[in-house]
Amino acid sequence: MTSTLKTDKIEGVTSSGTVQMPAGHVVQVARTYSANSGYIQTTSTSLVASGVQCSLTPKFSNSLILVDFVSSMGDGDADTLKAKMYLKIGSASIASMSGAEQYHIGFNGTSYNRYSPVCFSGSYTATSTDTLMFEPYILSSGGGNVRLGHTQASVGLTVQEIAQ
């Protein structure tokens, strides 16, 4: 014998948004995406903000937060583009995301147009329901001009909350 439950909306007993999802289910997704947005350039040898930001306010204080960043193109002028994911929790200062090691995109030629994808995939375990803001930071390994993105390419930063 099978049963069918039909409903238009599920709410918690005391307030909306408090229904506990089974472990492993996606609770919510936030995404920042831009196509044909142009270059994000730097000659800085210290990590600087890329301006690509995505925020999510966890529904639950113990959720797993999956973070995926992809830029279909990055390049440099005889230099190496490096990047690292940063995280801001609530009103705290932005800081390097724990466990997010700096990743390298190697370019050792003498001109632009040595395009390569720039990707990051990581996770964070929420400890509160404070808003989380993620942003990749970039640098030039030797001070030459490096670029993230392209006028004919896309950049995407996706954050997912997974119930635990």
Image (spheres, rainbow, N blue to C red):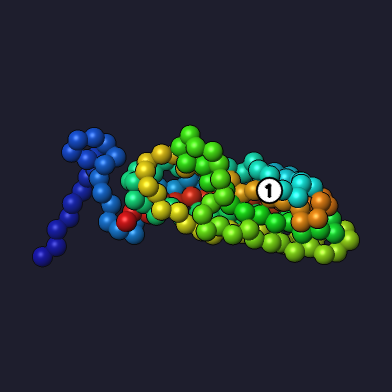
Instruction: Find the residue positioned furthest to the right.
Output: 110
Q: Position of residue 144 (x, y in %)?
A: 83, 52
Name the quadrant containing residue 121: bottom right
Q: Nearer the viewer, residue 115 or 100?
A: 100
Residue 93 falls in image quadrant = top right
Residue 117 left/right relative to 9:
right
Could you say which is closer to the camera, residue 5 or residue 22? 22
Residue at x 51%, y 54% (from the top left corner): 98
Residue 151 appears in the rendering: no
For the residue marked with disc 1, what is the amino acid? Leu
Q: Looking at the picture, tell me which residue is in the foreground, 98 or 35.
A: 98
Q: Is residue 129 in sight in this rendering?
A: yes
Q: Residue at x 76, y 50 (%)?
A: 45
What residue is rendered at 18% in x and 38% in y?
A: 13
**At which x and y percent is residue 10?**
24, 43
Question: Could you tell whether 31 is left or right of 74 in the image?
Answer: left
**Foreground residue, 145 or 142?**
142
Determine whether, in the image, residue 28 is placed left or right of residue 107: left
SS at mark 1 in the image: loop
Which residue sits at x=64%, y=60%?
103
- According to the image, label 1 marks what residue? 47
Q: Locate residue 4 relative to residue 99 in the image: left or right.
A: left
Q: Quadrant of the C terminus?
A: bottom left
